Image (cartoon, rainbow, N blue to C red):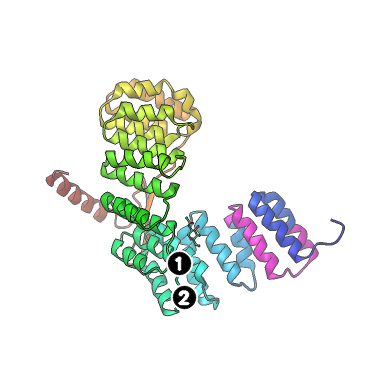
Amino acid sequence: MDVSPNEGTLASVLVACGRLGVVRTGKAVHGWHLKREREMRLIVWNAVLGMYAKCEKLDLARRVFDGLLARDIVSWTVMLSGLVNCRRPSEALELFNEMQTSGVKPDKVVLSTVLSACASLGALESGRWVHEYIERKGIEWDVHVGTSLVDMYAKCGYLESSLSVFHKMPVKNVSSWNALINGFALHGHGREALEYFDRMVASGLRPNEVTFIIVLGACCHTGLVQEGLLLFESMKNVYNLSPWEEHYGCMVDLLGRAGLIQEAYGLIKVMPMTPDVFTWGALLSACQAHGRVDFSQQILRHVHELESSGSGVYVLLSNVFAVSDRWTDVKRVRGLLSEKGLRKEPGSSVIEVNGKTSEFIVGQKSHQDMDEICTMISILMKQIHLEGL
Ligand SMILES: *[C@@H]1O[C@H](CO)[C@@H](O)[C@H](O)[C@H]1NC(C)=O
């Protein structure tokens, strides 16, 4: 450029860096500008923030954010949605608490972002607070806000609240229906999920790929094999959608759980993409559940093909063999695992009780009420056995 760039230029360049995810160039623009102008205007700072957030460099974004002398609604929005997108919802909620004392009033975008943080944490109290805030301030219910509320209540397990918000929404789109149907599916109400799927179609909306991931998942967890097969067919033939890897994965899982191992394996063989770790994992779990070690061994022969797919397959395979006392095979698979330096990401789950969030990580027993929790789990397990479930 042969003229000197102004704030607009810099903001545009930073947006480009963010979209491309080139944090080095973004940093260079940031630094270049710092050297030239002592006082950057907020529009450029917000663009710097946005660039770091898009590049998923949240700690850099946070440093910039904390250093700002003044913050407007854009700064807060960028920082909050960055945290939510990078799966750091509890930090997002903390930041939202700070925002409330900052004098900047949250708008619809901020509230939707906060609701999705609540949804992923199961933070019902904060979610309810946002709901009341929306009512109190008379904030208009657009599709976005309404859907976020439906999703929040659904994921927190409050299906009735979810439904009542859903019915109050003046305008709904496919995403709103998906959030509701997903709520039923997540909490084991497969039939209701399918019922609302039918209602959605009857209302004239066309289901999208995400809808099918949700309803196929619902079939899978409720053991609705025929319904699942019909839906999978209709996805291709009626709605003209090409199944993604996730849809094949769901179907493999569905067939496998029903003991139709051969059919599940057949589907893996015809799928147009390379099956990922979850798809193989579903098949292997099915082999394990139905005692088909012969099949697992057949899959082991393909192991070299799976190398790129991560550690989950190896762990599962070794579990399959461990169950059937084939310890030499276990050692072989575990050996493969450590040779490749693969490590399994620990699973975790989060819940809010009385306004306090607790995170549980697989294998960690650091929660202060661990003894009580374990006692309660064993009582529940006994009851489940008594009920013959
Ligand atoms: C539904 O509406 C919201 C808000 O306008 C939008 O973000 C979303 O993409 C829409 N969903 C679909 C499937 O069109």
State how many labels appear.
Answer: 2
Residue 145 got which mark?
1
For disc 2, the neighbor class at 10 Å (few under 14, some 14 to 19, many from 20) is few
Residue 341 in view here: no
Residue 244 located left or right of residue 53: left
Q: Is residue 335 above or below residue 130?
A: above
- Residue 71, image quadrant: bottom right
Q: Residue furthest left?
A: 386
Judge whether residue 165 is colored magenta: no
Residue bounds of the magenta highlight: 30-58
x and y percentages locating residue 213 in the rendered image? 40, 45
Q: Few, some or many C-alpha atoms within 10 Å of disc 1 (few <14, some 14-19, many ≥20)?
A: many
Residue 208 x, y percent position in the rendering: 44, 49
The three-letter amino acid code for the residue at tag 1 is: Val
Q: Which mark is residue 139?
A: 2
Q: Residue furthest right?
A: 2
Q: For this rendering, which residue is in front, 212 or 355?
A: 212
User: How far apart are labels 1 and 2 at the CA level?
Assistant: 9 Å
Q: Secondary structure at mark 2?
A: loop
Q: Is residue 44 left or right of residue 253?
A: right
**In front of the other: 141 or 385:** 141
Q: Is residue 34 magenta?
A: yes
